[in-house]
Image: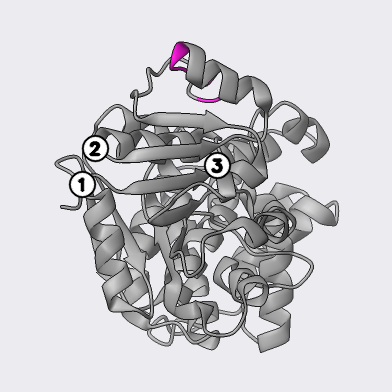
Amino acid sequence: MTRGARLTVMGAGSWGTALAHVLARNGHAVTLWCREPEVAEGINARRRNPLFLSDVDLPEGIAAMSDLEQAAGAPCDLLVWVVPSQFTRSVLAEAAPHLGAGVPVVSATKGIEVDTLCLMTEVFQEILGPGSETRLATLSGPSFAREVVAGMPTAVAAGSTAPDLAHHVQGVFGSETFRVYTNRDPVGTQIGGALKNVVAIAAGAVEGLGLGHNTRAVIITRGLAEIRRLGLALGAEAPTFAGLAGLGDLVLTCTGGLSRNRQVGVALGQGKRLPDILAGMGEVAEGVKTTAAAHQLAQRHGVAMPIVEQVHGTLFEGETVKKAMANLMARPQKPEADFS
């Protein structure tokens, strides 16, 4: 396992804070960029993030700062990106001129850019320029931030077309409580991490409606089939969706009480309005924006995604959860083996 690296984590929400905690606990020197000055001040003065995971003591190896240029320009062996997907392009465009030449980047952001339908690695390639794909990796898997900082055994996947970089990420993050597997499929790793949030909204919605375990199992299983179909259409590799970034993350997000996207779904199933639900949340539920992007990608590539379609109708078209569930059950029956 690699120790003593200089690492920069961009984004100090719950997940960014948790990853900074993992890295500092592994003996690395961590620069943590915080959008809110009060977060940087709280971490440096009291070793606690006042807004996210506020009851967690953070290691001394984390130096927080709110100046974006200063953070991006800090000496760095690996940049860890945890900025929400819909803000990644604007923040990266501002940070990029200050990054060290050739610094490798691992994106731990789960989402798809709505305006362009780009994956995060595609956004990075557009801004960092030709040839940058060899310095990009992704990190995804079943990993609630609170359980990670508590030291509960967790495993994730690092995907990159550059195997040496994936192994470097593995060495930097790996510990006795945080296990990292590698793959060569950043597309599938990102699709699994993004779309599981959409399916989690559906799983939460049927729970909020008062339906049982049978129904949730249907949503998870058929949701995985939809994720796999879209992923394959975008060039992903099928085995990825049976792994941590696919099935593993999907099960966690659809069933775990800490899932923000599942919580959105539960509230929808209980009849609450989306603006009211989002107004009451302290953090971003990536699945809401990702639903719009996934719906457009499905149409662009001619991929059947009935669960995504019904979640989209519930979030953006005024359809009730009860009607959405009825629509899914009324679809023509067909063989399962073709995953269609």
97 versus 14 height, above or below: below
The three-letter amino acid code for the residue at tag 3 is Arg
Marks 1 and 3: which is nearer the front? Answer: 1
283 versus 111 height, above or below: above
Give the overall secondary structure of the magenta segment.
Answer: loop
Residue 335's quadrant in the figure?
A: bottom left
**Magenta span:** 46-52
The three-letter amino acid code for the residue at tag 2 is Gly
The three-letter amino acid code for the residue at tag 1 is Arg
Q: Where is mark 3, residue-wise?
A: 262
Q: Residue furthest right?
A: 318
SS class, disc 3:
helix
Residue for point 70% across, 39% down:
268
Residue 144 shows in the view: no
Residue for point 60% across, 48% down:
83
Q: Where is mark 2, residue-wise?
A: 27
Q: Nearer the viewer, residue 124 or 3?
A: 3
Please say whether residue 48 is one of the residues in the magenta stretch. yes
Residue 3, disc: 1
Residue 306's quadrant in the figure?
A: bottom right
- Residue 125 rendering spot, x and y as whole percentages: 60, 76
Residue 183's quadrant in the figure?
A: bottom left
Residue for point 40% across, 47% down:
7
